[in-house]
Amino acid sequence: MTGVGSPWDTGRSAMIGGDARNRPAQKCQLPASAGSAAREAEADGSRVVWRVQRESGGPAHVDCLLGAPAPFGAREVGVQWRDLGSLLPSTSGLKQSSASAWRVAGIRVETGFHHVDQAGLELLTSGDPPTSASQSARITGRKMSEKQMKEAFVSNLNGTTVLEITQGLCFPAFCILCRGFLIIFSQYLCSFSHTWKTRFFIDFVVLIVPMVATLTIWASFILLELLGVIIFGAGLLYQIYRRRTCYARLPFLKILEKFLNISLESECIPAISCFRVITSAFTAIAILAVDFPLFPRRFAKTELYGTGAMDFGVGGFVFGSAMVCLEVRRRKYMEGSKLRYFTNSLYSVWPLVFLGIGRLAIIKSIGYQEHLTEYGVHWNFFFTIIVVKLITPLLLIIFPLNKSWIIALSITILYQLALDFTSLKRLILYGTDGSGTRVGLLNANREGIISTLGYVAIHMAGVQTGLYMHKNRSHIKDLIKVACFLLLAAISLFISLYVVQVNVEAVSRRMANLAFCIWIVASSLILLSSLLLGDIILSFAKFLINGALVPCSWKLIQSPVTNKKHSESLVPEAERMEPSLCLITALNRKQLIFFLLSNITTGLINLMVDTLHSSTLWALFVVNLYMFSNCLIVYVLYLQDKTIQFW
């Protein structure tokens, strides 16, 4: 009897006859050859991962599933064999796997704080998050160092559901909409004066603080938060409509008709700016919060298969950068000599090389904790961006810019075929010798090097999306059509994701496979369509209030069709002349500085604070203070027009 988990629910518990935490302890039986001391394990609500190795072949992986995430399904006895060494399909159960002799190599608990040999083991009941790191760190063998404990704390995780991540992405989009309503309501209906300090405070409280809470203490109530912010926004919009200063005597349908004839203008597309800010802020929060127990383990990066919230962060960063790359914003940049174009692309990556090598040197010199299966021994995300920025110009020299989606689709399909029908997957998981070696540059960094193919595909998809978004669309009706198209595209991709996960392979950030690329693009389009919807609603609210000014939003221009004498701006001249003083604009334009600052302060906090044993209140205070400091520094640098721009 086999229970197969839904591909949409790869991070949820595959319960064997109900919730394991409310049942008697389950027993996982290994074959007799595993050794009598480690043959039998009891756990009550714990996830046990047995790492085993065939005596006659390469390594294999066994999940002893006791109320734990099970993307491949759970067996009647609560165990599933997954031979990743030979990459064969699952067997029918433990009883049929006795043909091969197995040797126990170790055991880990979900919180990752055990490394026990055959002499004995102790399993703990693991919650999400654990009550304390010390409780999870109880071991019967040798004691692990703090560095090893921190590495184990973020290892062997299976993620959460696609639906939960999608809900979490839509939440900050509606927070930004409520921010716009609050600015209109406070400044124009309550005569509240806005300075750069008050604008920073509003942006931080309305956008950053809710994101911190969503990724920590409110993680189990994402749907309720989403519904709450929608209701709150609807109430603010109703109050603005009641107190409107324009078309006060006209009925709603007449006002809507006039609104649909409005034209728009902006220096940049607000939805793209907000997308980049959300992904940057989300990543900054997660890279620090993940080291604290209050951060749900299901949101952390997945080990092999699954969808973690942090997995979207890296993909979303690449997608967002692609939408505003020079090839998209300045089509003339690609005109002229192809050699000159490629030379300029090479020149633009040298600072990233410096940053990547600098990060590597610092990490190795101070003995900072690392998750080797994320990128490898020496590789980091800076190197991934470098490779992406070197490969994509070559592709755009050969293929037309407006065919980027074909390039993205071709790369992902060919890459997935290589994973399925060649030894490429085995190379990523176990190295050239099949035993997990890290000897040699390729073996040491195999995950980071090979997964760049997936990120190249994501970048090309972002280029195509950016081209579509940057088309000359100066009318509110055009904006509505764009939002609807992106929403339909996202829905189609989610359907494709379901089909791929059922018939091909589950999402894997480690390999950046086909399912991962589809998931990243689909989630990005959902976020973009949500932001565009918010832009349209916010523009309607501005249309109701004479002279409404909201930073990082569309400026409304009276259409010549409705006013034949002249085309008139509906916003004061001050908005055209003054810079947009808001945190969103600052984070968008200083994204690199914010990213570097977040990495540096994360490292410093980890060196100074015992994150594993921090209480919930202390951890929440540290994360909020960390975000406040980083945002304030970037905001002040933006006001002083200090910048670092490499691409």
Image (tube, grey):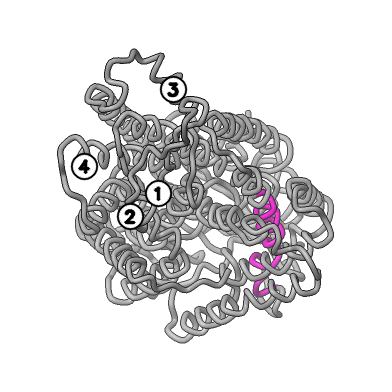
Distance from label 3 to label 2 (Cα)? 29 Å
The quarter of the displayed image where residue 134 is located: bottom left
- First in sequence, mark 3 or 1: give its number: 3
Could you say which disc has been placed on residue 552 in the image? Answer: 1
- First in sequence, mark 3 or 2: give its number: 3
- From which residue to which does the magenta span run? 443-461
In the displayed structure, 368 sits above or below 513; it is below
In the displayed structure, 147 sits above or below 461; it is below
Residue at the spot of label 3: 258
In the displayed structure, 349 sits above or below 251; it is below
Compare residues 530 and 472 and report the one nearer the observer: 472
Could you say which disc has been placed on residue 43 in the image? Answer: none
Distance from label 2 to label 4 (Cα)? 15 Å
- First in sequence, mark 2 or 1: give its number: 1
Distance from label 2 to label 1 (Cα)? 7 Å
Measured from the top left, where is residue 90 in percent x and y? 70, 42
Measured from the top left, where is residue 197 in percent x and y? 21, 58
Question: Residue visible at 65% across and 57% down?
Answer: 455
- First in sequence, mark 2 or 4: give its number: 4
Q: Answer with left or right where residue 279 lies relative to residue 204.
A: right
- Dot 3: few (<14), some (14–19), or many (≥20) neighbours within 10 Å? some
